[in-house]
Amino acid sequence: MKQLLNRRNFLKGGLAATASAAVLKNKKTEAHSFEGYPDGMGVLVDLTRCVGCRSCEAACNKEQGLPEPAKPFDDFSVFDEMHHGQKRRTDETAYTIVNRYDVPEIDHPLFRKIQCNHCEEPACLTSCFVNAYTKTPEGAVIYNPKVCVGCRTCMIACPFYIPTFKYSSAFKPRIMKCIFCYDTRLKDGKPPACVEACPQEALTFGKRTDVLKMGKQRIQQKAGKYVDHIYGEHEVGGTAWMYISDVPFDKVGFDTHVPKEPILNSVKEFLGIVPMVLTIWPGLFVGFHLLATRKDKVKEMKEAEDRNNNDEKEGQA
Amino acid sequence: MKLFAKDRPEIPIVDHLKADGTEWTIKEKLWLGLSIDEYKKQFFRNPVNWLMISIFSIGIPLILGRYVFGLGWVTHSSNDYPWGLFLGFGLFGMVPLSASGFMLGTTVELFGRKDFHSIERLALLNGLLGYFFAVIFLEVDLGMPWRLPYPMFVSLGPAAVLFLVAWHVATYLSVQVAEVLPAFFEWIGWLQGKRIIRKWVLGLTISGIILSTLHQGALGALFTYAPAKVHPLWLSVNFQWIHYFCSSIFAGLSMVIISSTLIKNFMGWRCDDGFKDNLDYVTIGLAKGASYAMITYLVIKLVAIAHDQEWAYLLTGWGSYYMLELGVGVVLPMFMFAVGIRNQWVALIRLGAFITVIGIIWNRLNTALVCYNWQMYQEIPHWKEVWITVTIYSLYFLTYRFIVYRLPIVYGWQGEK
Amino acid sequence: MRTRKKIVRTAFALAIGTVFIVPSQTWCMDASDAPESVTIDTMSDLYGPVEFDHLMHSEYASCQECHHQTTGEIVVDPNCGRCHHSHDENDIVSCSECHEADRFNKTYLKTLENPELYHFDKPGLKGAFHLNCVRCHEITSGPTGCQECHTMTEAGEKRFNTGSYAPAKGTASSGHEH
């Protein structure tokens, strides 16, 4: 972890230096911690417990003051909705969604809740060029609409397709995404509204380290019941929300191909070359210039010499 | 214009002085030395202008609508495809095609290749306008366009790739303005300004190389934020920035070939003999440069596949599409360049350049749209989105033409220099 | 794969909230020691109180299937039996005495940090009820829909945008449509 921090700071330092050098302008580089906080909270989602009652969706809608839904929250026909061949996803009206999956090997449907996973090193945060995102010590990834320019790079970067854009608004568009109920609950130590609403305790709230322990214990104690994997323990460098399941994760809509390291790591190849280009290029190309124009210079000098010689000759004459 | 140029010796304007010895005013220069009626006449005679008018008549209301009703009114509001044509074409496509400025700047100013001097200004202008309109496209796409300066001055996220893009494009845009200014100073007759810029030219050129290397690369690196979304063949975490930088070289050069061809064919009255006589030689030279970049590009593409062990993907449908893109977009024009250079067939080179430009835009659209979310579904842009893209591109075309008509870009200023 | 039998065995385990039973002198309790019916209303807000027919349920399942070892019977899960094998009935039998109604409050979460604590993954009261009721009902074809056991209150209708608060057709906003 420490190593990671150093490298990251190094990169940031390099980039900051780069930017300042490029524009000859000293800028304040606010140190943002990309690390997970030791006391960050988390949620363990147990897919074997979820019954698809959509109480979490309803609770989220009210807690976050989101628009009225198209269908009531106790209408289960939404599970059959398909958009572009895809199941429902988060959008500007819903921060969390429950989808149903019919897995052939199992005689009953499975349900999976999606919302922001609140990564330890969030891709949205690291890709944002105006620092609109913050990972709070409580574990939430929150968003500041006051500085966002609406470039939507965070939506590109998020491996879980979570941030959504309020396309419907011309004058006050913004990113809409789950913020772990940070403002209203998490910062006071309370669980998010969805967790509190869940009748099945499919969502277990606690310190990330504790719920991770719980997940491991459940897998171990109910030997054979669960797949031996906690989705989110290592995915994209770890997430605050983690999942355990009794069927392989790819069968219930999880992307099992996401990297097991922070998204930022795949960008570092490029970030690493930036200081190099900035320091080496000027010297290199001035050198090229001198070499390439050497002939002209020599010619000029020769001409000047000839002229001098002629002058001298004339003087002598 | 040809019509007027034939029987009025002072037109096209190449000097401060009229035939009778008095000076042109700026206003007269703007009207190309024509009376307003004459100007109208030549304007409406041109069928291209009618095409423009028809594009704008729908496009302008659409653009206004976008600012009144929001992006959702002109796009599909996709959360799965946050970037559509405005960025896929406008930013990722326009910027590599504008690499010409730094390429020719480097060739002429840095390497002292004076034989390319006749095309340098066109290349610089091509670069400037390409970048400028990439920013315009960005302004259409941004959710909050009025906050464009935020990443510079209000809230800084220096560890983000886009931060580099923003700063470097902004800085480079200023560099390019400075590089094109001498033509403007000649035209308005302010030589002091030109002399000042002349002193900076080496510095400007070198900063142009640095900034271009970084932000052309950075545009590619933006996609490394989505390693699980872009098809592996179009995304190489290690080499993406080199792919983008390297392809921008031949993209920029090819764009200048196209633009100079169009100017020579449709604006012959505006070109001076230096430009016209040199063009074939210059075109062959540019094609040579482009071919070197292309072969390098192909090699790095291959290295990337080998590095990531992606050979198996080549056998899939996506693999065929990938090879089609490279085959048509790069290998074919590369051969056309090679044959054209060997046999001095400039027309073949020009056709090759056209294919190259299409190939690059195709590649950028593939990365940003077609092969993005390759495991999901294909997003087809909304017709309004397409129309607005075409409208802004037309605006780019008009601005380009407006400047080439007037400033000494493809002709030498005859007045004091 | 989940084993259905295990679920049956542990089903009915924790259904009663407010009941408080005085321990009898017998070595092991039986259903006759318990009240016939229990009203569960500790958390009624979105849903009204539930009348739980304890007598009826005790005919379906033995005590330990809901009450673990607390009634003095041998615990169902052998894993639990490794420690809970005393066969002594406990002073506390009611669900709410062990299962926290406010499962995720700060103070309770703090107690879970005790490294000596073994049962740090104990469900809260609401979770304990539903996990047992619903699973067993699924197997025995008992009621599983929310409103088959609960009557929704007005607050519930508001929360779920249903009943008198249902979205008017056609006017509701939907971000899904493209």
Image: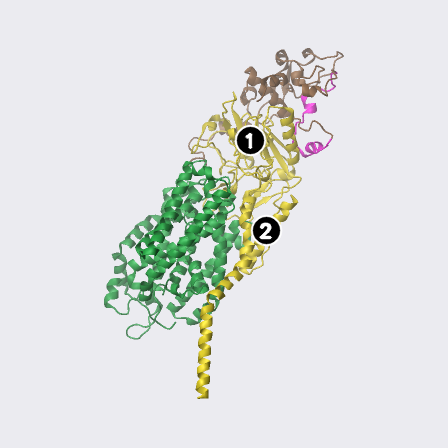
Chain colours: A yellow, B green, C brown
The quarter holding residue B1 reads bottom left
Please name the amino acid that badge 1 sits on. Answer: Cys
Of pointers 1 and 2, the one earlier in the residue sequence: 2
Determine contact: label 1, label 2, CB under 8 Å.
no
Is the residue A213 above or below the residue A263 in the image? above
What main secondary structure does the magenta stretch of the protein show?
loop
Report if residue C105 lies within the magenta region.
yes
How crowded is the residue under tag 2: few (<14 C-alpha within 10 Å), some, or many (20+)?
A: many
- On the question of residue A42 being in view, the answer is yes
Q: Quadrant of the C terminus of chain A?
A: bottom left
Residue B83 in picture, x, y percent from top left: 45, 44
Residue B356 in picture, x, y percent from top left: 37, 50
Disc marking residue A56:
1
Please name the amino acid that badge 2 sits on. Answer: Lys
Magenta part of the chain: C88-115
Asked which secondary structure carries label 1, the reply is helix
How crowded is the residue under tag 1: few (<14 C-alpha within 10 Å), some, or many (20+)?
A: many
Locate residue C45 relative to residue B67 in the image: left or right.
right
In this view, which residue lies farthest toward the bottom? A317
Give the Cα distance between marks 1 and 2.
38 Å
Residue A137 in picture, x, y percent from top left: 64, 42
Is the residue B141 above or below the residue A241 in the image? below
Q: How many marks?
A: 2
Is the residue B183 above or below the residue B310 in the image? below
User: What chain does badge 1 belong to?
Assistant: A
Q: Which residue is mark 2?
A: A12
